[in-house]
Image: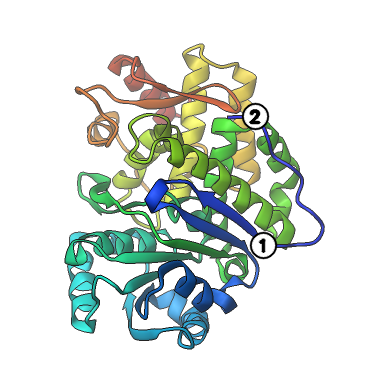
Amino acid sequence: MPASSTEPSTKVASRQVHVALGERAYDVFIGPGLAANAGVQIKSATGANRCCIVTDGNIEASGHLRRLSDSIVAEMSILGHIVMEPGEATKCFTELHLLSEGMLKLGVERRDVVIALGGGVIGDLTGFAASILRRGVRFVQIPTSLLAQVDSSVGGKTGINTAQGKNLIGAFHQPSLVIADTDTLSSLPDRQLRAGYAEIAKHAVLGDTVYFDWLERNVGAVLAREPGALVHAVARSVEMKAEIVARDETEQGDRMLLNLGHTFGHAFEAWAGFSDKLLHGEAVALGTAIAARFSATLGLCPPQAATRVVAHFKAAGLPTRVAHIASNTAPTVEELLNLMDQDKKVQAGRMTFILLREIGRAFISRDVERDQVRQCLEAEIAGTA
């Protein structure tokens, strides 16, 4: 991917990114204060006269639900609000059933629109429910976490977790619109903000050296929630993802690059029980650090590049070692291998890894031998990698 990053302007203005998918194309709006005009934008993008809003208890308590409802009610009827429990554990069959039944009870029809107001959990769960409700209804993403704004709200991946792994049940169902109001990040807990930053850094590591250089200089400003830095970081990450999704919507090729850090990270996340022991973004940071070290060990990228990647995640306060997981026990190699065998990218029994040749040059590899993966995990668990 070309290194096309530019410095953010001193005046904070909203940005618009187009996701070019033909008849399924849509726009992503990024900037401060966008929720105030959400009703007009949703009406314009969908033409719907009725909507249903899905959120979680934390977002309801923050006041974001009330502010969004005030914006929407002048443009269309709100059939009702469905408030889910916060947390990754909500992405399961039980909650999918409850959400689907709730939308049917509210009378959601095919011409209506479902609005997902929340982080990645709400977006993934709501999008999946919308994809199967009446064989498909439209939905809009209004992400309120940094992780959701830069990653999960864009690209149409929806789904739930199972005991076997993360997002193994789901569907591709593109939103009709994404509104990323960066003001909603002001109330986001610091740990959640850092977890979202992991996806920002991942995007730079996989495909934009200039962006990575900018992040090294501005990580403090992004984590301090400086408006200009936030808008620039979110917009550049969305641009990168939109470019890849437009080339490979259903992850048959290039889109797999976006899974840098995920083959390792998802295994650790599943081992931790999709709990607060290891947030998704933290798992991505840990997985990307391991992938960088693994790439260097295999002689695929310079050791100094791997060191620089790991140092950046450390600077953001993110985990880079197995010992950083908030657990009294450590996973075994066999536990992790069994979970990695369930990865969605496994083909003909061989694991797929996203590895590095250099910062900004990720590639897809199916040539890694199982013994090499085993040795990598042994070293990582022992802390000797």
Position of residue 158 relative to residue 341, above or below, is below
**Taking the image as drawn, is residue 261 in sight?**
no
The residue positioned farthest toward the right in the image shown: 10
Given residues 136 and 334, the one toward you in this image is 136
Q: Quadrant of residue 113?
A: bottom left
State the separation of the CA atoms marked 2 and 1: 31 Å
* Residue 14: assigned label: 1
Residue 182 drawn at (x, y percent)? 61, 65
* Numbered disc 1: secondary structure: loop
* Numbered disc 2: secondary structure: helix
What residue is rendered at 28% in x and 60% in y? 91
Amino acid type at image mark 2: Arg
Amino acid type at image mark 1: Ser
Residue 359 drawn at (x, y percent)? 60, 26
What residue is rendered at 30% in x and 61% in y? 125
Position of residue 91 relative to residue 272, above or below, is below
Q: Residues within 10 Å of mark 1 (few under 14, many from 20)?
A: some
Position of residue 204 relative to residue 368, above or below, is below
* 180 sits to left or right of 125: right
Residue 243 drawn at (x, y percent)? 51, 40
Residue 344 drawn at (x, y percent)? 27, 37
**Taking the image as drawn, is residue 346 in sight?**
yes
Given residues 2 and 291, the one toward you in this image is 2
* Residue 143: assigned label: none
- Give the residue pinned by disc 2: 308
What colour-coding does the image apply?
Answer: rainbow
Quarter of the picture containing the N terminus is top right
Q: Residues within 10 Å of mark 2 (few under 14, many from 20)?
A: some
* 99 sits to left or right of 70: left
Earlier along the polypeptide chain: callout 2 or callout 1?
Answer: 1
What residue is rendered at 37% in x and 41% in y? 249
What residue is rendered at 24% in x and 30% in y? 334
